[in-house]
Image (spheres, rainbow, N blue to C red):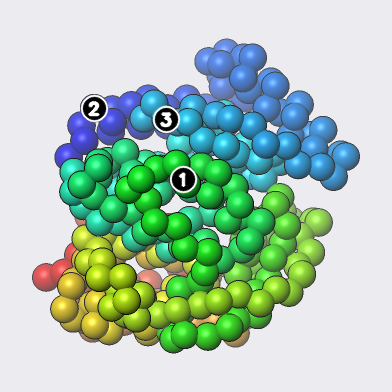
């Protein structure tokens, strides 16, 4: 367990809470500049790459006015609970699979945690997002970059690319975003290469200790291509859940129950600790941890 980094994460997370005035007082120049830059990019319909430090002492490129990028620039972290789970479970020499890498925040963190003897396999299908991901990760010798999607089988998929501002919502399915925040999110269809995780593992020889799955409603599809992984390798797995709007995808409950059938136990992080998760009929946004029994 990385106690020092967990303490740093807690401090950065504390800075992200509170009212606007409190946040400004904690880091006035950085917060004000980021707010002005965000508004300028939205007004001019432009994107700007900037470097930002991370809570563990690294650095990465982010792109304004994309929402995750803005948050990372202001506070140095993203998704406190999932970040804490990664800190709890990765160690020197671990093999980490990052399915849905986006700009590379979790892969960068994992690269630092697993060290030169470990490996990080990153999967990001959108070409424009992959370019930024690659800029952040290509210099890391323990990171293997894959410009492809993970799916139930080998396929060429029609993928919705919402552009850099909404790149976190690119998906096989529609954008998983609340309607009031979706203004300007217009998709273009692109073809992407996809592979099942079982076939990728067979071809690469990698044996993941930890798999993070964040694939914008395609989580269940990905799990369908992991039978050998779930029965023979049995890594720890995190799955993003959240049934924000209807669509032709499988609801989060099905993904949760699928892993339970393979002898996994579900946990959620609550009040700074892991607690057993009770399956729900409908899910709001969260990341659940699944550990083999």
Q: Earlier in the sequence, mark 2 or mark 1?
A: 2
Q: Earlier in the sequence, mark 3 or mark 2?
A: 2
Looking at this rendering, what residue extends furthest in the right direction?
Answer: 44
Residue in the image at 58% along x and 30% along y? 51
Q: Which numbered mark, 2 or 1, is in the foreground of this view? A: 1
Q: Is disc 3 surrounded by few (<14), some (14 to 19) or many (20+) residues within 10 Å?
A: few
Residue 259 drawn at (x, y percent): 28, 77
Per the image, label 2 sits on a secondary structure element best described as helix
Residue 267 visible to an observer of this rendering: no
Q: Which numbered mark, 3 or 2, is in the foreground of this view? A: 3
Quarter of the image with the N terminus is top left
Q: In this view, does 209 lie to the left or right of 105?
A: left
Q: Which numbered mark, 1 or 3, is in the foreground of this view? A: 1
Q: Which mark, residue 4?
A: 2
To which residue does mark 1 refer? 137
Q: Are marks 2 and 1 in contact (CB under 8 Å)?
A: no
Residue 63 drawn at (x, y percent): 66, 41
To which residue does mark 3 refer? 58
């Amino acid at each position: 367990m990385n106690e020092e980094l967990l303490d740093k994460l807690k401090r950065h997370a504390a800075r992200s809470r509170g009212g606007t005035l409190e946040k400004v007082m904690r880091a006035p120049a950085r917060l004000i500049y980021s707010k002005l830059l965000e508004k300028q990019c939205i007004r001019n319909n432009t994107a700007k790459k900037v470097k930002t430090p991370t809570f563990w002492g690294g650095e990465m490129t982010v792109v304004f006015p994309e929402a995750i990028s803005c948050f990372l620039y202001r506070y140095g972290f993203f998704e406190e609970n999932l970040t804490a789970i990664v800190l709890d479970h990765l160690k020197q020499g671990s093999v980490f699979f990052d399915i849905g890498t986006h700009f590379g925040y979790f892969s960068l963190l994992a690269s630092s945690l697993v060290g030169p003897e470990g490996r990080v396999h990153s999967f990001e299908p959108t070409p424009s997002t992959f370019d930024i991901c690659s800029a952040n990760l290509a210099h890391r010798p323990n990171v293997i970059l894959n410009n492809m999607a993970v799916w139930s089988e080998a396929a060429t998929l029609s993928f919705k690319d919402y552009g850099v501002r909404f790149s976190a919502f690119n998906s096989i399915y529609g954008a998983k975003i609340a309607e009031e925040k979706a203004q300007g999110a217009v998709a273009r269809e692109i073809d992407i290469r996809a592979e099942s995780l079982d076939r990728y593992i067979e071809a690469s020889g990698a044996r993941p200790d930890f798999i993070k799955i964040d694939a914008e409603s395609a989580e269940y599809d990905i799990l369908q291509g992991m039978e050998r992984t779930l029965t023979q390798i049995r890594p720890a797995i995190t799955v993003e859940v959240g049934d924000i709007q209807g669509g032709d995808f499988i609801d989060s409950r099905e993904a949760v129950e699928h892993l339970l059938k393979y002898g996994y136990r579900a946990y959620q992080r609550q009040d700074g600790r892991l607690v057993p998760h009770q399956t729900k009929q409908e899910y709001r946004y969260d990341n659940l941890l699944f550990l083999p029994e």
